[in-house]
Every structure is written in structure tokens, then in C-alpha cells.
Amino acid sequence: MPLKWILEELNIFGRCRQYRLPIWQCPQFLFLLMGLVIIASALITYALGTRYFVLEPSVVSLIVFVITIILLVVAFSIVRSMDGLAEASRLKSEFISIVSHQLRSPLSNLKWALEVLVSKRFGGLETKQEEYLKIIQENSGRMGELITDLLMVSRIEQGRLPLNKAVFSLGDLAREVISGLKLLAEASNIKVNFEPSASLPRVFGDTQMIKVVVENLLDNAIRYIKDRGEISIKIEDRGGHLLFEIKDNGVGIPPNDQKHIFQKFFRSQNVLKYQTQGSGLGLHITKSIVEKSGGKIWFKSKEGEGSTFYFTLPTR
């Protein structure tokens, strides 16, 4: 058993694949690297001790040996702690993935049953019954969106988010998303202006994933504008990539919260007081998709005046 354990620990590439981490972040690789540094430091210390401090080689060897053992024990303890954290992160991602998959099927059945009842195929409904069914239908829809987001986050963390890249029109995709969120914008008394530059080149990426990016940004802009408002969307050719810009005059992001805005489950304090719906996963997913597509994402914001989000996508 000890020999098998040692061989498993020495299988650096296998453990890195298990944790789904790049090799330079893998605990086993870091331990090996730290070991090599410690051995090199010990040899240098021995050479300096025998040459400049005129000590007996046996005394120098003992000092170097003791220091080396102490450093190796400390390094091993640190790496074992990192190993435990990496394993916990892997198990957490697998748990989220399994639970999300298990919840999706019964939720789909519930959604189908609600649609049948609301459609009145089996007879009419009283006003109160219809009202309650619509509330259930709305909340089941929110649960479905949350499960979809959790599954996507799990795939991102495990490095299993597939991107089927192809050439497509970012302008056409933006128009499609704006049309899909038109009712939400109108219900919120928000005007959406779209100003694409003329003769834009096509971009290279996964159409469905980039659609998720644009939907998340536009949905956030709509939800974080209070009372009446306006959203401006622009797409410009910057030579080698397209720049997508979405500007709103909403509540903005407080300065202290801006550094956390792309973190999982994070929501600004000024948004929470408005009881705006959201899981805090949208911007994390958006950033991951854009960066995996070869682009960059950033923003500018001032509390009380609004926010402007930007992202780029390669055109070739």
C-alpha cells in the first residue's frame, strides 16, 4: 500500500488531470519544484559553509541536512493542504454537476405539466387558480435558469465547456437578443438603442455561447435600471477584433464592489436593496466565455450614474 501511494503521488500528470488543473497549479508539481529548489539551496549552503566559514565538512553537512529536512517538511505540509483544497474543489464541482442534472429532469416535467394546466386543455380555471399556477410557472422558470447557470459554471471549472467555433455576424446576433428581451425592456420603460458600425466583419466564436454573453449583459442592464432608462449598444471594428459596448444609466457599481464583479455568486450591495433577481453567476459565466473565445471583457461604472461593459471577439 505505501509503494502504491508513493507511485500515485509521483504521477504528477495523472493527478493534475484528476484535479483538472494546469500543471503549474498542480500541488504535486509544486512539491517537486519546491524540492528541487530546496536541494539546490542545500548544495549552495554547503559550498558556502565549507569555503567561507571554515567549518568542518561534517558540521556543515549536519546543519544543511537539518535545514533541508525542516524545509521539506514545511513544503510537504503546505502542498498536502493545497492537495486537500484541490480535491475539495473537484468534489464540489462534481456535486454541483450531479445535483443540477438530477434536478433538471423533474423540473422539466413540472414545467410541462404547468404549461398544460395553464393552457386550459382540461377545462377552465378559476381566476385565483390561474394566478397561482402562473406564479408557480414563473418560479419554476427561475429555477430552470439557475440550474442552467450552475451546470455551465460546473463545466467551466472542470474545463469541459465545449465551444463550437464558426464565423457569424455579431450584429445579427445582437438584434436577435434585443428582440428576445424587448418585452422585458418595454415593461420596465427602458429604450434600447442599437448602433452597429457599417460593414462590420464577421467574428469567430461559438454562436450560442456568445448569445449567452450578450443576453447576460443586456438582461443585467435592463434589471439594474430603476424607473425609466435608456440602454445604448454599439459594435465597432477595431482591426482584428470587434468591440461590443453596452451602456446603461442604471444604479451603477460601488467602487468597493468593482474588483469582485466577475466573481461567482457576487452581487453589489446597492443592487441587493432593490431586491433585484439574480444568482450572481451571469458575469462570471460571461467573462469565462469571452476569454475562452479569445476575447477580453472589462467595464467602467459610477454608482448612481450607470455602467458600460465592453468585450472583444476576434474576427479571424
Image (cartoon, rainbow, N blue to C red):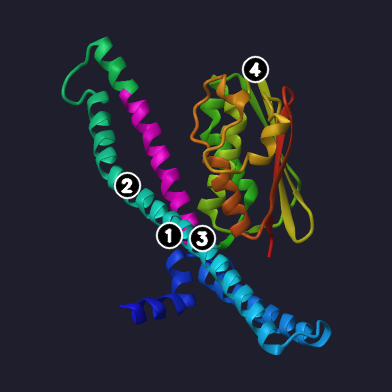
Secondary structure at numbered mark 1: helix
Secondary structure at numbered mark 2: helix
Is 187 in front, or is 77? Answer: 77
Q: Label 3 belongs to which residue?
A: 82
Q: Label 1 belongs to which residue?
A: 87
Instruction: Characterize the local packing of mark 2: few (<14), some (14-19) or many (20 or more) Cα atoms within 10 angstroms.
Output: few
- Look at the image and tell me in which quarter the N terminus lies: bottom left
Secondary structure at numbered mark 4: loop
Residue type at mark 1 is Glu
Residue 237 drawn above or below residue 223: below
Q: Viewed as shown, does residue 87 lie left or right of 194? A: left
Give the distance between the C-alpha atoms of the residues marked 2 and 1, in whole angstroms: 18 Å
Prevailing secondary structure of the magenta residues = helix
Q: Is residue 33 visible?
A: no
Residue type at mark 3 is Met
Question: Where residue 58 appears, x then y in whole percent?
Answer: 66, 87
Q: Label 4 belongs to which residue?
A: 228
Question: Where residue 127 appears, x then y in whole percent?
Answer: 27, 10
**Which residue is found at the position 63% from the left and 56% from the top?**
291
Q: Is residue 227 visible?
A: yes
